[in-house]
Image (cartoon, rainbow, N blue to C red):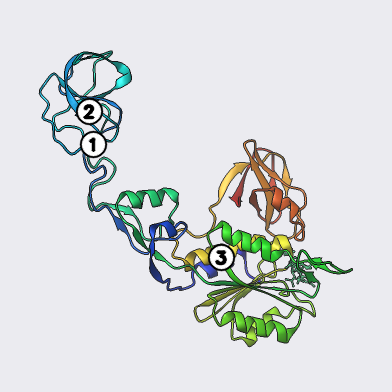
Amino acid sequence: MVSIEEALNSIKSQDITSKGETKPLQEVLGFALSEDIMAPFDMPAFDNSAMDGYALCGLHLEYKIVGEIAAGDVKEVPLQDGEAIRIFTGAKVPKNASSVMMQEKTKVEGDTLFLDEMPKAGQSIRKKGAELQKGQLVLQKGHVLNPSSLGLIGSLGLETVRVFSKPRIHMITTGNELVKPGHPKQEGQIYESNSYAIAGALEQFGFLCSQQQQVKDDFEETKKSIQKSMETCDVLILSGGISVGDYDFVKQALEKNGVQELFYKVFQKPGKPLYFGKRGNQFVFALPGNPASSLTCFYIYVLPLLQKWSGHKDLGLPWYEFPLQHDYENRFDRPSFLKARLTPDGVEILDGQGSSMIQSMALGNALAFVELGQQFKKGDLIKCKLIS
Ligand SMILES: Nc1nc2c(c(=O)[nH]1)N[C@H]1C(S)=C(S)[C@@H](COP(=O)(O)OP(=O)(O)OC[C@H]3O[C@@H](n4cnc5c(N)ncnc54)[C@H](O)[C@@H]3O)O[C@H]1N2
Ligand code: MOO
């Protein structure tokens, strides 16, 4: 049995050679950059107006209007002191303009412009290079591309991006008692639900489960399905059959397939019988079958491995600290990840902490962490990961 910290260190220290690929900008949301992006030019590339109004030469209350510049116009209009030119947001500001006045603060009579207030030097002019300067580091290798990153890269004129590939992920659910939703179930059977939860969690973080198999608690069948999956996958996720029961064959079946154990059993609740192994560059997680155990292990352990594989700079969901809404004492016999809900009033530890209970997780949005025997008073800070 290893500690949570040892398990995480084992995962994060794996030597994974991530592969790079070039992809179109519209397909890289959620991918990590495999090289730095530098600014190919100054941003903005030219001084431009932040407002619809008038570009002014000199600081006065009255000007002579001498023309108009729209966004996209390239003409250079030399302004003399006391002259103004009609200008629109984003249009190139003439070289010798001192400032721009928004039109709401002006009055026009014929070709004379009157201002309601004295302009300030530089006002409403977005200066060349104010955001980025040519050659400057814009986004670092390992940065995970969010929607604004795509906008930023587009604004640099790049239509393709070098990113790290994502792993091919396969899943195997095990259990004689499992029936797929939509089919009638007999006495003693339960509906198979972990594959939906894990596939959803994968999708939530931009990953895809590309193959899913369902096997009986049978050593040969489990061994064969692992063999088949591992012909093509990079990461294999199993659920169930990893504890010590007479029908728990996953660990032996992995051994027979040449998978080397990196750790088995973590001192935690839920998810004690968690298994992590590797074969060459392929990684295997066998998640405990209880629904809350398997999903919790996904968020805490599987996600950082997938992120490492995909070249992310930061691994795992970050920890935040928030005040608890009530007293709490960890009466479980292990350090525990608790289903919790974060609201503007603080963190509430939810009822239904059993490893088989998933409704509390569906209603919650966080996993709170408590050490063995840890006690909290209302208002104490508690560590949380936000999971939705
Ligand atoms: N003697 C011991 N028994 C158990 C121990 C132990 O230390 N000693 N650990 C318990 C803990 S903790 C867990 S967690 C479970 C994990 O067991 P397995 O990973 O072998 O999982 P199964 O026995 O196959 O299933 C557990 C539970 O989850 C249900 N299940 C399984 N797969 C699915 C699925 N795909 N969708 C929905 N539900 C699923 C299954 O029906 C069982 O109820 O072991 C304890 N036992
Ligand atoms: O560790 Mo198990 O996951 O408590 O139910």
Amino acid on which the number 3 mark rests in the picture: Leu
Q: In this view, does 101 lie above or below 299?
A: above
Q: Residue at x 72, y 41 (%)?
A: 327
The earlier-in-sequence mark between 3 and 2 is: 2
Q: In x, y percent, where is residue 47? A: 22, 36
Which dot marks residue 352?
none
Q: Residue at x 64, y 48 (%)?
A: 365
Q: Is mark 2 on a helix, strand or loop?
A: loop
Q: Quadrant of residue 114?
A: top left
Front position in the image: 345 or 212: 212
- Ligand 2 shown in quarter: bottom right
For the residues labelled 3 and 2, the Cα–Cα distance comes to 50 Å
Image-based side of 236 in relation to 181, left or right: left
Q: Give the total number of marks visible in the rendering.
A: 3
Q: Is residue 222 above or below residue 31?
A: below
Q: In x, y percent, where is residue 323? A: 62, 40
Q: Are marks 1 and 2 in contact (CB under 8 Å)?
A: yes
Q: Which residue is drawn at 37% across and 64% down?
A: 34
Q: Residues within 10 Å of mark 3 (few under 14, many from 20)?
A: some
Can you identify the residue that label 2 sits on? Answer: 122
Q: Is mark 1 on a helix, strand or loop?
A: loop
Q: In this view, does 66 lie above or below 194?
A: above
Amino acid on which the number 2 mark rests in the picture: Gly
3 vs 2, front mark: 3
Q: Residues within 10 Å of mark 2 (few under 14, many from 20)?
A: few
Which dot marks residue 208?
3
Cβ of disc 1 within 8 Å of ligand 2? no
Q: Residue at x 58, y 62 (%)?
A: 202
Can you identify the residue that label 1 sits on? Answer: 127
For the residues labelled 1 and 2, the Cα–Cα distance comes to 9 Å
